Amino acid sequence: MVALVASSRVAVAQSYASDPTEREYWERSRAEAQEDAKKRDARLDELLRLMAIPVDRESCPLQRVDARLVSLQGTCRDLADEASASAGTRGREKFVREMEALVRECSKKYADLYVSQLTVTYYRADFGAVSRRMTAGGDVECLLAASHNAHARALVQQRRATGAALTRRQIANAEDALAATAPLPSHEPSSGALALQVLATVLSGMGQGLSGGANRLRTSDSRGENVTVPAPLDIDGTVGEARDRWTAHSQRSGGCSSDFSCGVGFTCVKDNFSVTGYCAKAVDAVGVQRFDLPSAPMSVGPKLPSRTDCPNTPCPAGFQCEFSSGTCVR
């Protein structure tokens, strides 16, 4: 029976809403993480498009570097042709030597400029690997373009995986936080609340009998007694950690079913296993009134024996234990 009551209290606790602002924050965080992931993927797609070298069906670049240097290459070739035409001609040996020097200088400038442009254009390529493959033949720019594009795709894929892992952590954190908060209230009674109502009806007669009858329960109302209420059960039905206990002065008559029936500054005092009690002014151990909010959902339903009830827990000075409710009275 105690286990049934405890499970009912858990159901009732879940029907209470946590701070809507907190739930909205984590729901928004989860949605923003998903939206950021889409934007990040779009930016990475654009980055790959900008980095990639456009190639033809044979994986050769559509815009070659050597095509941009065709004019300089033609000049060097013309100088070489003129030097060759004059070679062997008597009286033109000096001219031929000068032309050959010009050809060497032009070729060097062409080679330096070509290599520089290859480095800038195919900046992601593995030039060492391409040089080794060139020993077996092949078009240098086709090999450089393939190497560049492969490394560009690998870089983008790495960044995409890192971003996806970050998004998963963000979503997991948001979902963990949402799971730790109670669901928002529903306009219709929850199954836990309905179960508690049925349980309260079944136990009401038993609670009245165990407490010695409703009339005896009300007698403490008219005596103006001070009552110390030990710490209530946690919502899972287990006894909470040691904490300050309430004392109460019976000033308000009439029955109650929970702290909500009494209002701020008062508490509903019930005998063990009873679902009803009386409203009493909540005070501390020295008689000063406390204005704690109602202890929902612990005050809802039958009052169950607790490890912190008296006589298990000593009463404050000047109080005596009332065994029917497990409270300290004065």
Image (cartoon, helix red, strand yellow):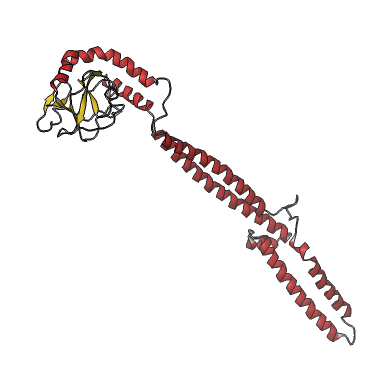
The residue lying toward the viewer, choosing from 85 and 275, is 275
Q: Residue at x 79, y 76 (%)?
A: 103
Query: In the rendered view, does 188 fall on the left or right side of 318?
Result: right
Q: Position of residue 67 (x, y in %)?
A: 78, 62
Query: In the rendered view, does 225 fall on the left or right side of 19?
Result: left
Residue 107 in view of the camera: yes
Position above or below: 184 against 273: below
Query: In the rendered view, does 56 fall on the left or right side of 148?
Result: right
Residue 177 figure quarter: top left
In what quadrant of the picture does the C terminus appear? top left
Residue 62 figure quarter: bottom right
| Residue at the far right in the pictured view | 90
Q: Residue at x 22, y 15 (%)?
A: 207
Q: Position of residue 110 (x, y in %)?
A: 75, 71
Q: Position of residue 294 (x, y in %)?
A: 28, 28
Q: Position of residue 9 (x, y in %)?
A: 31, 24
| Residue at the far bottom in the pictured view | 91
| Residue at the far left in the pictured view | 318
